[in-house]
């Protein structure tokens, strides 16, 4: 989708759907998902707070000054199983920005993070906050405040890709990373040498240098601190056709309560890179399940036979009519052959009322990224590394 | 030091390959002259091996932070493609003068959310995907692809 088209979609949402305006604007006023309980957080797939997100799943997170009742409820936070930790726009935090304690290094300098996504970064200070969702609490954990004014973005950070620092570039008020690691970077960021990939900086004024950051100081997946702390379960109804919005649930814990049993779900264990394998037409590719990807992103036009879209939907596939495909996902003992359909993105986007697209696909050479459409009609579990569950310790996916 | 698995060289034709665990630091940014430039290896503090082939050679680097970077070089010495996997790499270094084009194109399509990018800016094609802690991507110049080589070879 071009920026022009995304604006068009946004206008249609704001002007044409007054009756369901809140479903355009974020998660705070949506009807509850199908499950309820102290560990059940409502999700909604809709246009999001910038009114133009296709297949974005959002929720509301409450952020508080540690140990206080000074809190801000932030809607429109993207729920992402492909990253780890909470990041919130400073503009969405309002007056809380100045009240959250800044993390400092041993020399008393501010710790600022260059959070590395695929080909973009998020820059901003590491601050300490209490994080609440449903009836769950993560107290005094490091989060990232998305704020490009904290210090000039270092050139080594900008060399990874453009910084996404605003509502319009993120399409969300924040990102809630609930994938299967407790910290966003892990052991490689704890060292102070060239093996450090450069997530964490110490900033003396505008002079920022890469530092080693211990695991507990890194930005944390809040779920690892909840009462139900071994992982999450995402649940969505089946979505037979494109729709304006769909409600779902994020349920904390695996096998910790009546509402989060594994049941007959198969366990898929990742390799050391955090990947499964997907076999397609006789070849195997690295693969993962990612609620933060807004389509099935897989392989290339030449490998799939699916034509790329023109500029009207650049980055997606545009077959002349819907194409049925199948692929086999495997990881550890788990193996499952999965059927899915890819529609014409340009035609799908032509209906500007819709923001939920079960057949949206796009290229991703050499990889099989099972994005949000995979989650429709499924219950998917994500178990955190090293945490015990009824099926053994994480990390794993199960569905 | 750990090398990744087998590299394919010279398109789909299986050619005998001489692996030079080289001290020959012939690496360059996209679109530049391989023979003249050692900047990438020095900047990225990477180790290098070179896999010569009939249509092109692959210069492979391993950075200390765990990224494998492959540069595809024509017999005349021009880098026509780069491919990477592992930690997110220093794209300014490996895309060279095309980095600004990548950033501009990336910022101009805000609705392409999620984990992947597919950008085409005339000559440059840039694609990447993955998740936090693991990235795969490639970039190539359509005008510089040698005869007999397709984008499927850039992997």
Image (tube, helix red, strand yellow):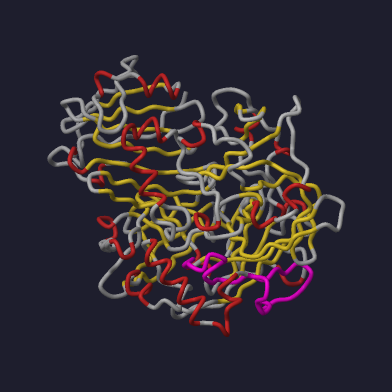
Determine the residue located farthest toward the left in the rendered image. Answer: B147
Residue B95: give x, y in percent of width and height. 34, 35
The residue sitting at 66% across, 46% down in the picture is A144
Left or right: A213, with A69 as reference point? left
Up/down of A165 relative to A197, above or below: below
Give the residues in magenta: A27-54
**Where, by quadrant of the figure, is residue B98 drawn?**
top left
Residue B34: give x, y in percent of width and height. 25, 24
**Where, by quadrant of the figure, is residue A247 drawn?**
bottom right
Question: Observer-nearest residue: A119 or A195?
Answer: A119
Determine the residue located farthest toward the top in the rendered image. Answer: B23
The residue sitting at 78% across, 43% down in the picture is A101
Left or right: A18, with A322 as reference point? right
Residue B72: give x, y in percent of width and height. 26, 33
Question: Observer-nearest residue: B43 or A326?
Answer: B43
Residue A36 colored in magenta in the image: yes
Up/down of B116 relative to A320, above or below: above
The residue sitting at 62% across, 49% down in the picture is A84
Residue A10: give x, y in percent of width and height. 47, 71
Up/down of A59 relative to A287, above or below: below
Residue A13 colored in magenta in the image: no
Left or right: A18, with B129 as reference point? right
The residue sitting at 26% across, 18% down in the picture is B36
Up/down of B79 relative to A102, above or below: above
**Where, by quadrant of the figure, is residue B148 drawn?**
top left
Q: Give the quadrant of the C terminus of chain B.
A: top left
Q: How many marks do you count on the picture? A: 0
Magenta stretch secondary structure, dominant: loop
């Amino acid at each position: 989708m071009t920026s022009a088209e995304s604006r068009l979609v946004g206008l249609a949402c704001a002007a044409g759907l007054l009756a369901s305006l809140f479903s355009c604007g974020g998660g705070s006023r949506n009807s509850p998902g199908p499950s309820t309980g102290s560990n059940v957080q409502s999700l909604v797939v809709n246009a999001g707070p910038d009114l133009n997100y296709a297949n974005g799943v959002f929720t509301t997170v409450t952020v508080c000054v540690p140990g206080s009742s000074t809190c801000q409820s932030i809607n429109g936070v993207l729920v992402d199983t492909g990253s780890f930790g909470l990041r919130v726009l400073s503009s969405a935090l309002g007056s809380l920005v100045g009240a959250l304690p800044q993390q400092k290094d041993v020399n008393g300098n501010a710790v600022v993070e260059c959070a590395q996504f695929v080909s973009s970064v998020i820059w901003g200070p590491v601050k300490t906050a209490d994080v609440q969702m449903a009836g769950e609490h993560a107290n005094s954990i490091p989060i990232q405040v998305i704020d490009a004014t904290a210090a000039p973005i270092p050139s080594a950070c900008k060399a990874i890709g453009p910084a996404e620092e605003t509502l319009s570039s993120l399409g969300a008020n924040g990102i809630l990373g609930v994938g299967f690691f407790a910290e966003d970077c892990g052991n490689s960021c704890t060292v102070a040498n060239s093996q450090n990939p450069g997530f964490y900086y110490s900033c003396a004024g505008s002079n920022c240098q890469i530092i080693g950051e211990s695991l507990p100081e890194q930005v944390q997946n809040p779920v690892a601190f909840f009462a139900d702390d071994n992982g999450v379960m995402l649940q969505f109804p089946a979505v037979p056709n494109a729709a304006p919005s769909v409600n779902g649930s994020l349920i904390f814990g695996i096998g910790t309560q009546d509402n989060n049993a594994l049941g007959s779900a198969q366990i898929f264990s990742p390799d050391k890179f955090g990947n499964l394998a997907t076999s397609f037409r006789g070849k195997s590719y690295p693969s993962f399940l990612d609620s933060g990807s807004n389509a099935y992103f897989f392989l290339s036009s030449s490998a799939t036979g699916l034509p790329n879209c023109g500029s009207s939907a650049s980055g997606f596939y545009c077959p002349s009519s819907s194409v049925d495909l199948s692929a086999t996902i495997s990881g550890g003992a788990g193996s499952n052959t999965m059927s899915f359909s890819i529609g014409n993105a340009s035609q799908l986007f032509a209906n500007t009322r819709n923001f939920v697209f079960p057949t949206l696909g796009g290229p991703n050479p050499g990889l099989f990224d099972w994005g949000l459409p995979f989650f429709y009609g499924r219950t998917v579990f994500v178990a955190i590394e090293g945490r015990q569950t009824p099926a053994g310790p994480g990390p794993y996916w199960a569905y | 030091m750990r090398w990744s698995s087998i590299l394919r060289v010279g398109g789909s034709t299986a050619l005998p390959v001489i692996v030079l665990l080289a001290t020959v630091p012939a690496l360059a940014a996209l679109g530049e002259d391989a023979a003249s430039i050692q900047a990438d290896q020095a900047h990225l503090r990477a180790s290098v091996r070179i896999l010569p082939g009939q249509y092109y050679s692959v210069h492979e680097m391993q950075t200390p932070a765990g990224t494998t970077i492959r540069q595809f070089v024509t017999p005349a010495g021009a880098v026509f493609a780069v491919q990477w996997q592992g930690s997110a790499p220093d794209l300014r270094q490996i895309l060279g003068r095309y980095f600004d084009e990548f950033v501009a194109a990336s910022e101009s399509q805000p609705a392409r959310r999620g984990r992947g990018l597919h950008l085409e800016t005339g000559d440059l094609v840039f694609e990447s995907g993955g998740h936090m802690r693991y990235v795969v991507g490639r970039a190539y110049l359509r005008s510089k692809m040698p005869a007999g080589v397709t984008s499927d070879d850039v992997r």
